[in-house]
Image (cartoon, rainbow, N blue to C red):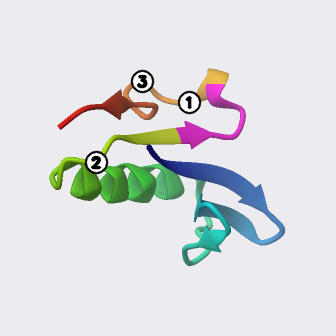
């Protein structure tokens, strides 16, 4: 399973996959959107993905997903 973590960083929010990090985002919402786009692109190739959001209990509906393609 490939996991994308949306985490708070010193200068905003970031999407991490393991030790790798994408460009920092100023907004939590934009970081979540990007994580979901990355996960959807990988799911199209048959991989199982999940988006985990720091403080996930307050995340918008549909942002945490684990699906089989």
Q: What residue is disc 3 on?
A: 61
SS of the residue at dot 2? loop
Which region shows up in magenta?
52-56
Tell me the residue at 17%/55% (across/down): 45
* Mark 1 surroundings: few (<14), some (14-19) or many (≥20) residues within 10 A: some
Disc 1/disc 3 C-alpha distance (Å): 6 Å
SS of the residue at dot 1? loop
Q: What residue is disc 2 on?
A: 47
- Residue 35, given in percent of the width and then of the height, sits at 44, 54
Task: Point out the tag, 2 or 1, that comes first from the N-terminus.
Answer: 2
SS of the residue at dot 3? loop
Closest to the camera, between mark 3 and mark 2, is 2
41 displayed left or right of 3: left
Disc 3/disc 2 C-alpha distance (Å): 22 Å
Tell me the residue at 41%/59% (across/down): 34
Residue 55 colored magenta?
A: yes
- Residue 60, given in percent of the width and then of the height, sits at 48, 29
Task: Point out the tag, 3 or 2, that comes first from the N-terminus.
Answer: 2
Tell me the residue at 37%/28% (across/down): 62
Q: What residue is disc 1 on?
A: 59
């Amino acid at each position: 399973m490939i996991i994308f973590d949306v985490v708070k960083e010193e200068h905003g929010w970031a999407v991490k996959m393991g030790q790798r990090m994408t460009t920092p985002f100023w907004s939590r919402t934009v970081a979540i959107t990007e994580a979901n786009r990355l996960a959807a692109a990988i799911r199209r190739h048959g991989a199982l993905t999940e988006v985990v959001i720091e403080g996930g209990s307050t995340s918008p509906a549909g942002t945490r997903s684990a699906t089989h393609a």
